[in-house]
Image (cartoon, rainbow, N blue to C red):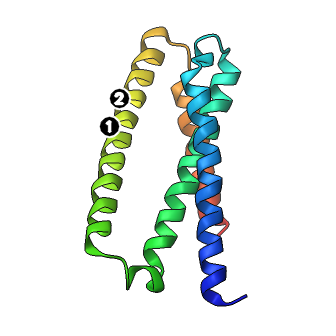
Amino acid sequence: MAFNETFVRSMQDWVNEQKKILEIAVKSYESKNYKDADRLNLLLASRTACQHISRTIKGFENWLQNPAIISVMPKEMLEEIYSKIWKLMIDLIEFDIKHTSDFLNHVKDKQKLDISSLLIREERSDRSQIYSL
């Protein structure tokens, strides 16, 4: 199989897989099953969504680092990517700030979590990563 055929097939496979994932995600979200879900199912579903987001972003990152792609991609497509990715980034950062702040207020108000023990564990894990380099 020639390079172009392999490349085209690879891109088509990616698109087909993404379409299947999108179909499942939309059906799942629109069914509003999350309204009746318990905490574990909500956690697992959210982690699955994060994994798909990470995978898609990594795909875009690889795409935009490939000289064969970016050398022929029209400026309009790059503008579209820029606009959409930056909007997603801003929305995600805003959500992160809101969610983290809301959670912090929740644990401070309810004193449901020993923040100091969390910070100590986080600090230890950061140090262990430095020492393992």
Residue drawn where x is 26% and y is 68% of the image: 76
* Vertical placement of residue 64 versus 82, above or below: below
- Tell me if mark 1 has few (under 14), some (14-19) or many (20+) residues whose alpha carbon lies within 10 angstroms of its own: few
Residue under circle 1? Answer: 94
Residue drawn where x is 35% and y is 49% of the image: 89
* Vertical placement of residue 61 versus 72, above or below: above
Considering depth in this image, is 95 or 81 the residue closer to the camera? 81
- Amino acid type at circle 2 is Lys
Residue drawn where x is 65% and y is 18% of the image: 39
User: Which image quadrant for residue 99?
Assistant: top left
Residue under circle 2? Answer: 98
* Mark 2–mark 1 distance (CA, rounded to whole Å): 6 Å
Considering depth in this image, is 122 or 98 the residue closer to the camera? 98
Residue at far right of view: 1
Q: Are marks 2 and 1 in contact (CB under 8 Å)?
A: yes
Considering depth in this image, is 33 or 130 the residue closer to the camera? 33
- Amino acid type at circle 1 is Glu
SS for callout 2: helix
Image quadrant holding the N terminus, namely bottom right
Coordinates of residue 118 in the picture (x, y in percent): 57, 33
* Vertical placement of residue 62 versus 43, above or below: below
